[in-house]
Image (tube, rainbow, N blue to C red):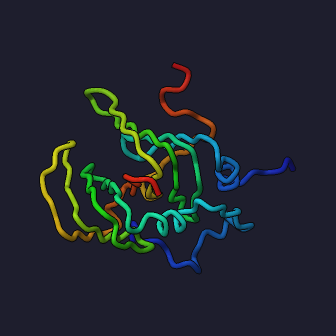
Amino acid sequence: MASQILPLELIDRCIGSKIWVIMKSEREFSGTLLGFDDFVNMVLEDVTEYENTPEGRKETKLAQTLLNGNNICMLIPGSDGPNEDQ
Amino acid sequence: MDGAPPPHSEAPAATAPQVQQHTGSPTDFLKGVVGKRVIVRLTSGVDYRGILSCLDGYMNIAMEQTEEHVNGVVVNRYGDAFIRGNNVLYISAAEAL
């Protein structure tokens, strides 16, 4: 059988790199991953918070941030966020 | 119960072997941020900016000199504030750690 990669191992490999975090709601974060825990609470650095509203997307810049894992839906390692390739 | 972290004995069995926790884990961040100015955003979108007094593993937070911001506008000020952790979306450092 081909060697498997566990999901948390994939995230662990992303420590030190950029990551794009998509929440269950219309909100996303992108920044450098510093670390995470068993509940996938995440510590990010140089973060941009994206709020997707009917009026448009709002961006907020944050420094070191602890993101509560309760509302996280999807993680995309190595991505700059929703504005990548623009 | 939704939002409450399960006891450690129930930590996900699927993650054995345990992933390497480098510095920068949530507990390290929380130790480093106590006493600093922080921005706490709740899932409702309301911001609280103040000095972090203490917090626990559930992300329950006690803060001093807190300003409540709704849509970027200060609507309230509290000398002491306690926030129940299940509401917290993020805790962000407002000053260098």
Describe residue B44's horizontal placement relative to residue A41 as left or right.
Answer: left
Describe residue A50's horizontal placement relative to residue A34 as left or right.
Answer: left
Residue B96 location in percent, x, y? 44, 53
In front of the other: A60 or B37 = B37
Q: Residue furthest top?
A: A86
Residue A41 location in percent, x, y? 50, 59
Residue shown at the point (44%, 39%) measured from the top left: A48
Q: How many marks on residues?
A: 0
Question: Is residue B41 placed above or below A54 in the rendered structure?
Answer: below
Q: Residue furthest right?
A: A1
Residue shown at the point (59%, 56%) measured from the top left: A35
Question: Is residue B67 placed above or below B84 in the rendered structure?
Answer: above
Question: Is residue A74 placed above or below A42 in the rendered structure?
Answer: above
Residue B35 location in percent, x, y? 38, 67
Residue shown at the point (58%, 59%) measured from the top left: B24
Q: Residue furthest left?
A: B75
Residue B13 location in percent, x, y? 66, 70
Q: Residue furthest front?
A: B96
In front of the other: B81 or A14 = B81
Residue shown at the point (67%, 53%) measured from the top left: A12
Question: Is residue A51 placed above or below A16 in the rendered structure?
Answer: above
Q: Which of the 4 image quadrants contains residue B20?
A: bottom right
